[in-house]
Image (cartoon, rainbow, N blue to C red):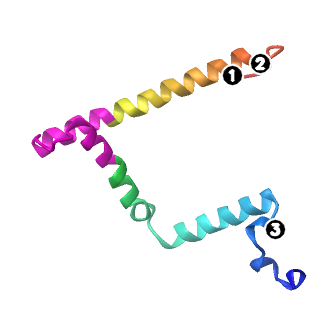
C-alpha cells in the first residue's frame, strides 16, 4: 500500500532532507503569495514586543508612552546583546580552527 501513494502524499519521513527543504520553501512562497507578511506575523510580533513592556513595567504602573519608550530601549538592548553574542561566537569559532582556515 505504501508503494502506491503518490509523491504529494508521501510522509515527511519518507522524503530526503533536500526534498523536505524544497517542500518547506514551496509552502512559504505559497503562504506569502496570498498574504501580507506583516499580517501573518502580527500576533507573534505583538507578543514579542509585549515581553519588553512587561519587563520594564511588571506592575503596569507607568504611563503608556513612558512604558513604550522604555520598552523600545529594552528591545534595542536585547538585539545589541544578540549581536555581541554573535561576534563572540564567531571569534571563538575562528580561534578553534586548526591550521588557520579561512574565516
Give the mark toward the camera: 1 or 3. 3
C-alpha separation, residue under disc 1 versus residue under disc 3? 35 Å
Q: Are marks 1 and 2 in contact (CB under 8 Å)?
A: yes
Q: Nearer the viewer, mark 2 or mark 3?
A: 3
Residue 14's tag is 3
Q: Compared with residue 68, is residue 5 higher up or lower down, i.e. above or below?
A: below
* Disc 2 + disc 3, Cβ < 8 Å: no
Q: Is residue 56 left or right of residue 19?
A: left
Secondary structure, mark 2, is loop
Alpha carbon of mark 2 to alpha carbon of mark 3: how far? 36 Å
**Residue at figure coordinates x 35%, y 33% from the top left:** 76
User: The N terminus lies in which quarter of the figure?
Assistant: bottom right
Circle 2 crowding by C-alpha within 10 Å: few under 14, some 14–19, many from 20: few
The quadrant of the image that shows the C terminus is top right
| Dominant SS in magenta | helix
Q: Identify the residue under disc 1.
A: 93
- Mark 3 residue element: helix
Residue 2 percent across, percent down from the top left: 86, 80
For the residues labelled 1 and 2, the Cα–Cα distance comes to 6 Å
Position of 19 relative to 10 (above/below) = above
Instruction: Tell me the magenta residue range.
Output: 49-74
Which residue lies under the disc numbered 2? 97
Q: Secondary structure at mark 1?
A: helix
Name the residue at 81% across, 68% down: 14
Q: Which numbered disc, 2 or 3, marks the residue that appears first in the sequence?
A: 3
> Residue at left 42%, top 33%?
79
Q: Return the x and y of residue 31 as percentages of the image width and height.
A: 54, 69
Asked if residue 78 lies in the magenta stretch, the reply is no
Residue 50 located within the stretch drawn in magenta = yes
Q: Residue at x 68, y 22 (%)?
A: 93
- Residue 34 percent location from the top left of the image: 50, 73
Amino acid at each position: 500500500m505504501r508503494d502506491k501513494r503518490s509523491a504529494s502524499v508521501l510522509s515527511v519521513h519518507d522524503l530526503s532532507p533536500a526534498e523536505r527543504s524544497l517542500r518547506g520553501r514551496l509552502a512559504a512562497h505559497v503562504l506569502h503569495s496570498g498574504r501580507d507578511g506583516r499580517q501573518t506575523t502580527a500576533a507573534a510580533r505583538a507578543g514579542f514586543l509585549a515581553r519588553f513592556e512587561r519587563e520594564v513595567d511588571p506592575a503596569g504602573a507607568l504611563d503608556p508612552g513612558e512604558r513604550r519608550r522604555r520598552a523600545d530601549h529594552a528591545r534595542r538592548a536585547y538585539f545589541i546583546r544578540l549581536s555581541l553574542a554573535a561576534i563572540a561566537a564567531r571569534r571563538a569559532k575562528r580561534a578553534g580552527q586548526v591550521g588557520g582556515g579561512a574565516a
